[in-house]
Amino acid sequence: MMMKFDVTEKDIVEAKSKYIESLSPFKLKVFPSKEKKKYVLLRFLIELFDEHTKYNEFEVNQILKPVYDDYVILRRYLVDYGYLDRLDNGKAYWVKQNL
């Protein structure tokens, strides 16, 4: 399920003020329930990954754990929204090209 939304500068500013506790290191206050707001935050999250690296699930979790307590939901949404791709068995994850 690849979701795309038109994201405005206003959307990004709102995400930074409402949902992001810190940009460096990246940490979320809360993960929103609205689809477009999730999409905006996931654009920040994917920047934590190197586009030339394949990760196993443990490595993905290690990157996401400091960002938000429910890091499993972040991993799921990164895949569901088309930012990360993975093997069906979950043994390898990588940044999806052409975002």
Image: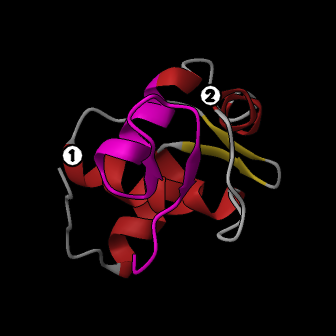
Q: Quadrant of the C terminus?
A: bottom left
Disc number for residue 11? none
Residue 72 vertical placement versus 13 (above, below): above
The amino acid on which the numbered mark 1 sits, given as a three-letter code, is Glu
Residue appearing at x 50%, y 35% in the figure? 75
* Numbered tag placed on residue 35 in the rendering: 1
Q: Which residues are magenta?
A: 73-99
How crowded pointer 2 is (Cα within 10 Å; few <14, some 14-19, many 20+) is rated as: some
- Asked if residue 51 lies in the magenta stretch, the reply is no
Residue 90 drawn in magenta: yes
State the residue in front, 16 or 60.
60
* Percent x, y of residue 2: 21, 58
Image coords of residue 79 (percent x, y): 39, 45
Left or right, residue 19 beside residue 61: left
Tell which of 29 and 49 is nearer to you.
49
Q: Amino acid at mark 2?
A: Tyr
The residue sitting at 20% across, 67% down in the picture is 4
* Residue 45 screen position, x and y as percent: 57, 53
Q: Farthest residue in the right direction? A: 25
In the picture of the structure, the residue carrying the numbered disc 2 is: 68
Q: Secondary structure at mark 1?
A: helix
**Residue 56, image x and y in percent?**
67, 36
Q: Earlier in the sequence, mark 2 or mark 1?
A: 1
